Amino acid sequence: MFIRRQVIVLSLLLALAGMALFSYKAFELGLPLKENTDSRVWTVEARLGFVGTGGPAKAQMRLPQQPPGLGILNENFISRGFGLSTQEYDNRERLAFWSLRRARGPQAVYYRLSVFKEAVDASRAQTPAFPPIPKLEEPYSTALEDLVSDARERSADIASFTSEMLRHINNPTQEENVQLFLGADNSTIAKAKVTQTLLAGARIPTRIANGMELRDEPHVATIRPWLEVHNGQRWLSFDVESGVQFEADRHLVWFYGDKDFVSVSGGRNVETEIFLRKEMIDSIAVAEQRAINVGSHAVEFSLFSLPIRTQAVYGVLLMIPIGALVMVLMRNVIGVPTFGTFTPILVALAFRETQLLYGIILFSFVVALGLLVRFYFEKLRLLLVPRLAAVLTVVVLLLVGISIMSNRLDLETGLSVALFPMVILTMVIERMSIVWEERGSGAAMSEGFGSLVVATMAYLVMSIDQLQYLLFAFPELLLIVLGLCLLLGRYTGFRASELIRFRSFGDSKA
Amino acid sequence: MWFTTPAKLNRAGVVGINERNGNLIMRYNERRLYPLVDNKILTKQLAEEAGMAVPKLYAVIETQHDVARLETILEGREQFVMKPAHGSGGDGILVIENVTAKGLRRHDGTHLSFDEARYHASTTLSGQYSLGGLPDKLMVEYRVQFDPLFEKISYQGVPDIRVIVFQGYPVMSMVRLPTRVSGGKANLHQGAIGVGIDLSTGTTTSGSIGNEIIAEHPDTGNAISGLTLPGWQSILELAARCFDITGLGYLGVDIVLDKERGALILELNARPGLNIQIANFVGLGARIDALRSRVRQPESAEARVAHARQAFAQ
C-alpha cells in the first residue's frame, strides 16, 4: 500500500535525521552522553522586578565579590533598555546600577552568574584585626559586660562562646539584658547585629554573610544572613536563629554586611527572585568551544543557552512526548483501557511532585471520594455543567483538606497534592461515574485501574534521569520519537488484549 | 487456553481494533459523512426519502422550552420510545408503555414522574449521552412491537439484527439478544448475547456472551441456534441500501423486526464493533478481502445481496 510505504519512509527519514544530528553532536563535537555527576558548577539567576511609576527609575543590586571557596566562571546581565554600570568599592563590595529614563509598567532586570567550586579552603584566607570593644553608655555597657561574662563562664572556646551568646539572643523573654539591645526588632539581621556588638565586647572578629546554600536540585533560593566568627585560624559560620554552627563550604556568599540586597527608586512592588541550579555546563562548555572552533552552529541553538528557569520547564516538557509514546504503546499495542487519551500523562506529571506511592494513594483517594459525591449529586438531578462545576469544587476542597490534614500530621507529601490537575481529576470522576452507571462497576474499575497503570508506567519512564539528560542535551532525539509515533500510527496488527478477547478462535477451527 | 497467537488470528481472518480503525474506518468512511449516522434524526430523514422503512418519528425535543412543555408534547400518546439523537450503545433510551396523569409508565413496569422525565430530557439535551458531551436533541418515536420470533430466546427489551455492510455488500450478520445482565439492552458490551447468522439462509448459528461462545440463552435456557429469520433477503437489501444513502464503506446497520411493519432500520453505526466475529466464529478479514476486487463495478442492492449470500454461505 502506498500510504503505508510513505509512513515507513517518513518515519525512517525522521529517525535518521535525529540519529545523525545526535551522533554528530555526541561523537564529533563531544557533547557528553551522561550527566557529569561530579560537576561543580552552579548557575544562579537573580531577577529584580518592579513596577515603574512613569518617571525615571534607578535600581541597584549587590553582586558577589570573590565569594569564598568559589570561582566565578562567567556572569552576565540581561536588562533590555536599561543603562547599566557596575562599581567596586575597596575590593569588598560590588554593586550593579540600572537606570531608565521613563519606566512605566512592570520592569525586570536579570543577573546571571556561574560559579564553580574551588579546591582551596577559603575560610583560612586572611586573619582579620581584633575589633575594638564598643564604647557604650549605661545601661548598655553593664548589660554587655554581664552578657559577655555570663557566656564566657558557660563556654570553652570561641565557637561555644558564640553559640552561647546566640542562645541568649534567641531567648529574649527571659533576658532583660538582651531585650535592652534588641528592642522591638526581632529580625534575623537585627539579632545578628546585636550579636556582633556583643562579640565585639569580647574582642571577637565577626561579620554578617548573606547568601544561600548550593543544593543539587534546581530550586528557588532566598538570600539569608548568617553570622561568621573568626576563631584565630578560620571563619566559623553560625545560624543566627538556632545558634547552630555549620560548614559553609556549600554556600555562596553574595555579600557581607547588613545592607539591603537591592534598592529601587522610582518604582514600586519591588521583588527579587533567585533561581539556582547545578549545571553540566563545564563539559558542555568544552564541547561548545570545540564546535565554535570547527565552525559548527549545531550547538549554538542548544537549550543550555536559555534562561535557567525556562531550562527547568523544558526539562519537563521534553519528557512529555516520551510519556505519550508510552501511552501509545500501552493503548494501541497492549490495549490497556484508560479514561481519556492523555489523562494518564497528566496524572504521571503530577506524580513527579508527589512521588509514586503517595501519588497513587492520593489519586485513588480523591477519585473514590469524588465518586461518592458525584453519585449523590446524580440523585439531586443537577444539570450537567453545574454538576461538573460542583464536582470540581468538591475536588478542590478535598485537596485543600488533604493538604491541611497532612500538614497537621507532618506528612510533607500531602502538600504537593495541590499540584494534581484538578480539572483532570474532575473529568476522571465524571467519566468513571458515567461508565460505572452505563457499563457497570467492572468496566469503570478496569478503566480506572488501566489509567493508573499507564500513568505509573509513564511516570517511571519519564523519571529516568539518563533519559531526561539525553533529551535535554539532544532534543533532536524527539525526531526518533516522532518517527516511532508515526510508525505506530500505521500499526494495524492485533493488540495484546485482543489475543485474549478472541481466544476462542485459537481453540479449534483455526 | 486463555489467550491465542496473532498467527492463529490471522489465519482465521480476524480483524483487530487497530486494523479496523486504520484500514477500514479511516479508509472507507469519510469523516464528513459521520453526521449522517451519528445524528439519528438525519439518518431517519435520509432513509425515509429513499423509501426505506424506519420507526416513525413523533416529535423532537430540542430546547429547554420544549422540555418545560413535555407533558403537552407527550399528551395522548400511548407507546413510544424516547432516545437521544446522538446517543450510542443504547444509553439514555426510555421505552414508555403509556402516559398517565402522574407521569410515564416504562416497559419494565417502573413509573417515571413528569419531573423525572423532564430531568432526563434536560440532561440529554445538555449532552449527557452524546459523543463528546455535545448538546443533543431528544427524539420521540414509534415503539417497535417486536416480532414474537425471538420471544423464547430474549429477556425483555428489543432484540435487533446487526448487519455489517462493506462497500454496499453485507458481509456478516448477527442477532443481538438482551439478557437480564444487559438490563434489556441489545448491547454486547453490557452483556447481551450475539448470535451469528448464516448469511445465505438467515438461520442462526452459534452465539457468544462477552468473549465466550455459548449454545443457549442464559435466562431462558432455550437453544439459540437453528432459528430462521423471515424475509431474510429484504432484511439484507435494507441493510445494503444504507450504503447508497450514506456513502459509508464500512457500516453497521441495526434492524428490528416489527410485528406489523416488518424490518425497520433502527440506526446506523460508522464504527461497528468486532464481537460479531466471535458470535459468528468467523473472521471479518477474509470476507472483506474477497470483496475488495469486486467493488469496482456498481451493482444494484439486490445483486449485491445475492452475491454476498452466495459467497458467504457457511
Image (cartoon, rainbow, N blue to C red):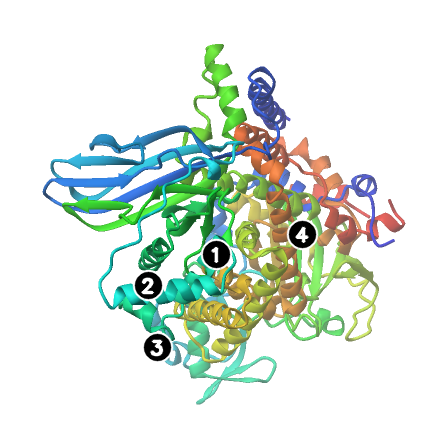
- Number of marks present in the image shown: 4
Foreground residue among A207 and B258: A207
Work out whether A279 lies above or below A154.
Answer: above
Find residue A55 and report its horizontal and vertical position in percent: 9, 42
Amino acid, disc 2: Leu
Mark 1–mark 3 CB contact (< 8 Å): no
In the figure, B219 relative to B251: above or below? Answer: below
Q: Is residue B90 visible?
A: no
- Disc 1 is placed on an element classified as helix
The answer to whether residue A383 shows anywhere in this view is yes
Residue, far left: A55
Q: Quadrant of residue B223?
A: bottom right
Q: Tell which tag, 4 or 1, sits nearer the viewer.
A: 4
Mark 2 on the same chain as mark 1:
no
Q: Secondary structure at mark 3?
A: helix
Q: Nearer the viewer, residue B225 or A504?
A: A504
Query: Which of these two is toward me, B123 or A192?
Result: A192
- Mark 3–mark 2 Cα distance, whole angstroms, equals 86 Å
As drawn, the residue found furthest toward the right would be A508
- The span from disc 2 to disc 1 (Cα, nearest Å) is 77 Å
**Disc 4 crowd, CA 10 A, few/some/many (<14, 14-19, 20+):** many
Q: Residue at label 1?
A: B132
Q: Say which amino acid is labelled 4.
A: Val
Report the residue marked by disc 4: A336
Q: Is residue B285 left or right of residue A20?
A: right
Respond whether the residues carrying marks 1 and 3 are from the same subunit. Answer: yes
Chain letter behind tag 3 = B
